[in-house]
Amino acid sequence: MPKLAHEDVLFLLIQISILLITARILGEVARRFRQPTVIGELFAGIIIGPTLIGGLFPDFIEWLFKTHKNAYIAYDGLTSVSMVFLMFVAGMEVEFENIIKRGRVSLIITATGTLIPFFIGFGAGWFAYPFLNVSTDKILFAMFAGTALSISALPVIAKILLDLSLIKTDLGSIVIASATLSDIIGWLLLSVILSNIGTSHHQYSIGFTFLMTILFTVITLTAGRWAVNKLLPLFRQNFAGQGGVITFALSTCFSAAAFTEYIGIHALFGAFVVGIAFGDSAYFSEKSREIIYQFVTNIFAPLFFASVGLRVNFIANFDMVIVFVTVCVAFISKFAGSFIGGYISGLKSYQALAVGAGLNARGAMEIILGLMALEYKIIDEKIFVGLVVMALITSMTSGGLMKYFIRKQQKTTVLSHAKPVGEETPSGV
């Protein structure tokens, strides 16, 4: 049975230590500037990788990452596990009851905020296909472009709402519910794309894969939620501390991820849906959630996002036209689609604009989506760089724009209730 040699283990540990501390430091710097930590973590990989240090000192990067390929393969496996953890935590952020409570409004916003950017992205991908260096089928590429533009980043959106003290408000609940539904639809669409690529492990037809995806989602969010609520108290009673609950949660996460990977969807979808089932349970204690959240966001997330910067030279593959078009089309289509849905559903103009700004954040989800597309050769490095830049820009601007529109709404409300100039005060008031 093959195993890592002594030097492979040594270099794997060196890689982890260098990337982890650099990513955590830069993530903290980003947080101090009121930006998502993912931005700093991504820049850690860009700095250490071929874009900066790798370009200036190629021998050093060759020695650290390429001389011992088994060590880097092991690190790549670790980042795959990190993605599964990240999606599980993203699912934990979902409040299922909130989706039901905000059903009508969130459904309308999800419909327009998903369909409008999807069809705009599909059209852009279809017409741009002849001018791009991609080898995948034209329809699949157009479908991916539409999916990439329609998906949101639930963890980033939740953090923005938390920072703005909006997480428990009606507007915040609507944004979270809409983002959740948008992500579920987006990952379902991605499952269709992946099942059509024709890689060796996708052994089932598209119809079977899509049917199994729907069944898995429905069963997990109904019978699965019921089973979680029945089993969690048993683990709490029979295991010391939080260990039993955490073991049960993560083993279920890996089992679901393995199942969805087996039927032709990516493992990330299984982890995300199971995360919803656990995060929604009243028996999943806040302490258990916090332990998993802290472990993932401070260890696995930095390692994953730093690894993104190692894969691509962001300077050599920076195409101004691709980046500009990607950012503009993604920003406008998602913002406009979500605004239209909010306005149709009865929100006031500035409230609908705030919803559009909030749902426009792409963050970690877009980067994961782009990395998967790069892995399966749906896109090339230049398009991947465009997607990453778009994810960063939308995440950095989302909170500020949302705050601006909310203040405008509050100002409008105050003015509308103000007494007109010259109007006499009624007697008795």
Image (spheres, grey):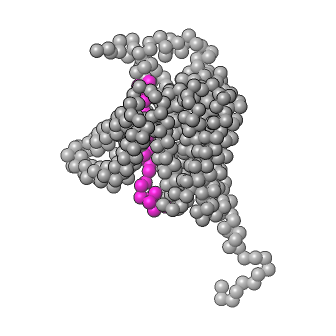
Q: Magenta segment range? A: 76-102
Measured along the vertical axis of the image, is residue 293 above or below residue 180? Answer: above
> Where's residue 231, x and y in %?
25, 49
Q: How many labels, in total? A: 0
Residue sitting at 60 percent across and 34 percent down? 387
Q: Main secondary structure of the magenta part?
A: helix
| Quadrant, the N terminus | top left
Which is nearer the eye, 408 or 363? 363
Residue sitting at 35 percent across and 15 percent down? 4
> Where's residue 404, x and y in %?
66, 54
Instruction: Find out whether residue 78 is within the magenta segment.
Output: yes
> Where's residue 166, x and y in %?
54, 56
Residue sitting at 52 percent across and 36 percent down? 369
Measured along the vertical axis of the image, is residue 75 above or below residue 405? Answer: above
Measured along the vertical axis of the image, is residue 145 above or below residue 337? Answer: above
Q: Quadrant of residue 6?
A: top left
Which is nearer the eye, 92 or 184? 184
> Where's residue 159, x and y in %?
52, 47
Q: Is residue 338 left or right of residue 228?
A: right
Q: Is residue 238 left or right of residue 246?
A: left
| Residue farthest to the bottom, as pictured | 427
